[in-house]
């Protein structure tokens, strides 16, 4: 079952984030996939997801401007779809 943006999400336990000047590299040890998180705001959002009931709650608690939320929802959806994030529960 794939995670949706309405359910609580968290970083998959097999994923490691390595800070980089542009944001972070995310490596999934289970699938051996690598992806780039190209903003520090996205890294902060992804790291905070486990503390919130939904992506929108995490966005509301962040300093990210609401006009930018659609791009962040899309990025989180992509990360969830590729297994870097999972449903919490």
Image (cartoon, helix red, strand yellow):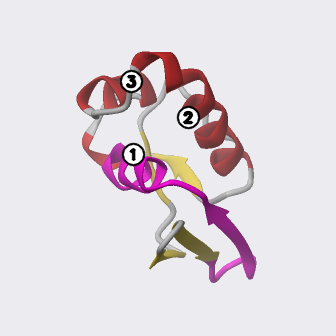
Asked which quadrant contains residue 1, the reply is: top right
Q: Residues within 10 Å of mark 3 (few under 14, many from 20)?
A: few
The residue indicated by pointer 3 is 65
Asked which quadrant contains residue 56, the reply is: top left
Q: Which mark is residue 45?
A: 1
Vertical position of residue 52 compared to residue 20: above or below? above
Disc 2 versus disc 3: nearer the observer: 3
Vertical position of residue 30 compared to residue 72: above or below? below
Q: Residue at x 64, y 41 (%)?
A: 75
Question: Mark 2 vs mark 3: which is more N-terminal?
Answer: 3
Q: Quadrant of the C terminus?
A: top left
* Residue 65 point in image, percent of width and height: 39, 24
**How much space separates mark 1 and mark 2, taking CA atoms?**
9 Å
Vertical position of residue 20 compared to residue 11: above or below? below
Q: Which mark is residue 32?
A: none
**How much space separates mark 3 and mark 1, taking CA atoms?**
12 Å
Tag 2's secondary structure? Answer: helix
- Would residue 38 be found to the left or right of residue 88 on screen? right
Return the residue nearer the eye: 52 or 72: 72
* Residue 8 point in image, percent of width and height: 41, 35
Question: Mark 3 vs mark 1: which is more N-terminal?
Answer: 1
Q: Residues within 10 Å of mark 2 (few under 14, many from 20)?
A: some
Inspect the magenta stretch and tell me whether residue 33 lies in it.
yes
* Residue 51 point in image, percent of width and height: 25, 43
Dots 3 and 1: beta carbons under 8 Å? no
- Would residue 71 be found to the left or right of residue 8 on screen? right
Dots 1 and 2: beta carbons under 8 Å? yes
Q: Residue at x 58, y 71 (%)?
A: 26
Q: Residue at x 51, y 63 (%)?
A: 12
The residue indicated by pointer 2 is 72
Tag 1's secondary structure? Answer: helix
The magenta segment is 28-49
């Amino acid at each position: 079952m794939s995670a949706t943006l309405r359910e609580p999400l968290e970083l998959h336990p097999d994923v490691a984030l390595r800070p980089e000047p542009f944001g972070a590299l995310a490596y999934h040890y289970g699938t051996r996939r690598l992806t780039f998180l190209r903003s520090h705001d996205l890294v902060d959002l992804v790291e905070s997801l486990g503390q919130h009931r939904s992506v929108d709650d995490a966005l509301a608690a962040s300093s990210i401007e609401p006009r930018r939320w659609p791009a962040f929802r899309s990025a989180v959806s992509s990360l969830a779809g590729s297994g870097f994030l999972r449903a919490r529960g």
